[in-house]
Image (cartoon, helix red, strand yellow):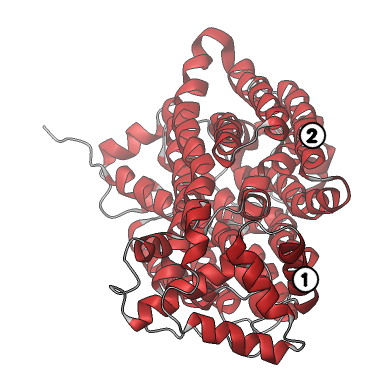
Amino acid sequence: MPRPTHVRYAVLAVATAAAALLYLERVCIAMASGYIREDLGLSPAQISLALGMFFWAYALAQVPSGWLTDRFGPRRMMTIYLVAWSVFGVSIAVAPNFELLLAARFALGLSQAGAYPTLSVVVKRWTPIAARGVASSIVSFGGRFGGAGANLLTALLIVWFVPLSTSARLERGDLLDAPALEKQLTAEQQNPRSPWRASLATRLLVLGGEEERLAELNTLIGQPGSFDAILPEGADLPAEARALANKSPAERTPAESQRLNRLLAEQAFPQTIRQLYGAGWRPALLVYGMLGVLAGALFWFVVRDEPTDHPRVNALEASWIAAGQVASPRAPPRAIPWRRLAGSLNLAWFSSLQFFTNIGWAFIITLMPDYLAETFNVPIEQRGLMTTMPLIGGCVGTLLGGWLTDRLVAPLGLRWARSIPLGGLKVLCIAAMLACPWLNSAWAVTIALTLMSAGVDLAGPATWSLAQDVGGREVGSVLGWGNMWGNFGAGLSPLLLRSIQQHSGWHTAFFLCAGAFVFAGMAGLLCDATRLLEPLAETRTDD
């Protein structure tokens, strides 16, 4: 007796891998942002603009790219999107100045915009309606998994690409802020944290010029053990520095002594000496670009637009997938349904939900690394781990969210099975953000942000499912419309939060995030998965 084939599982696996690379490429720049800022001589406002530029482009291209998928099919368009964003990711890695960095980030946003609308179409066409929430959660999990791995993997790659053979000497331009260094030295001389620091400050203050201080610091870097006095102060250090510090000065090689001294000098004078690990951000980002090109080839090989188009799908699998699917016209739409998207009150709530959610959520993928460095002076590897935790929480939330929204359909109906996760779970997000200003350790804040991220992503599969429920043959356009507004929120987030932080502190930024989640929760409760974009009988192929 013939059995159904299982090609759908391979399709779902490739879609999940594509989502993982999507977020890996998107999130990695946040971990590298401090090094990029030093390398290109950018201000905090400029790097925040570069972080936000991606989301503005991503938002603007959501509906057109979703429509392109509806028009030309997910196989062709997802392959194009994958290869294109990988090329522009490489452009970020080689950007020589602020202007080209902005352009590359904008192009990356444009090329990634169609990914989730396209993957949503893949899930709709390759999954029966009874399993749609779980399938959506698995693909969403891929994105969160890629985002979770991005910070930690990027941190490890950055360090790995700066081997011990890299010169530890300070070069011209490595003293980033001479006035700030002067203030640090004066403060240490007047209120020393240790006799060693006071002596070092006095030694450098008597040298009047930048060149003389640079030469003196290089002399100290070249002397084994010259900075070891900083170690008993309990400073947070990179893993490499801690490992080298466990050796006595006599046991270290000259290269190890110089590496440790350079890392300790950066610790002694934060944000005024260029970080040695900054040399690793460009090759780390190049690796992600090459992975994306390979993923594009794999997607083209495995996926087809419809199960019936795939040569390895038999009739039993095709009929199983089609079970419960709502009939929709085969002909693809010839124009973007702008009027119907903009005129739908249901989609207005859907868009508001995503806009306000992303204002609060985007903090963890844009400003959290800077927050940990500036507030708690967390070293790079530990910062990578901490910024990974909220996205791991998101992975768990995403997997549970698919089960949750599917499980609620039978007792509550489709309307509340979607809107309760979308709106009700924002209470957890609000509580977590309100707690952050009162927490006095980096790990405590990390735990709170992990709970926030889990709350957001518990509702993620319901977001996809709602777009699939109401979109008919135009799922890509509907999800793209909601994502557009969501990413306007994400693009606004780093600019708004950084501006507020500079004027009123990080506390106020957290309060703003909590307020955004309040509005998101109200909008989520008003979303109605039973209200189609338009009745099937009135479906048109133009606008």
Q: Crowding at label 2, few (<14), some or many (≥20) Cα neighbours within 10 Å?
A: some
Q: Earlier in the sequence, mark 1 or mark 2?
A: 1
Please, what is the three-letter code of the amino acid marked with disc 2?
Answer: Phe
Up the image or down, 275 lies above or below 444; here it is: below
- Quarter of image, res 451: top right
Residue 71, position as x, y percentages in the image: 60, 57
Q: Which residue carries the number 2 mark? A: 511
Instruction: Determine whether the residue tagged by mark 2 lies in a helix, strand or loop.
Output: helix
264 left or right of 449?
left
Please, what is the three-letter code of the amino acid marked with disc 1?
Answer: Ala
Q: Residue furthest right?
A: 503
Q: Which mark is residue 180?
A: 1
Q: Residue furthest top?
A: 411
Q: Say if residue 111 shows up in the picture.
A: no
365 left or right of 8?
right
Residue 343, position as x, y percentages in the image: 84, 38
The answer to which of 401 and 253 lies nearer the viewer is: 253
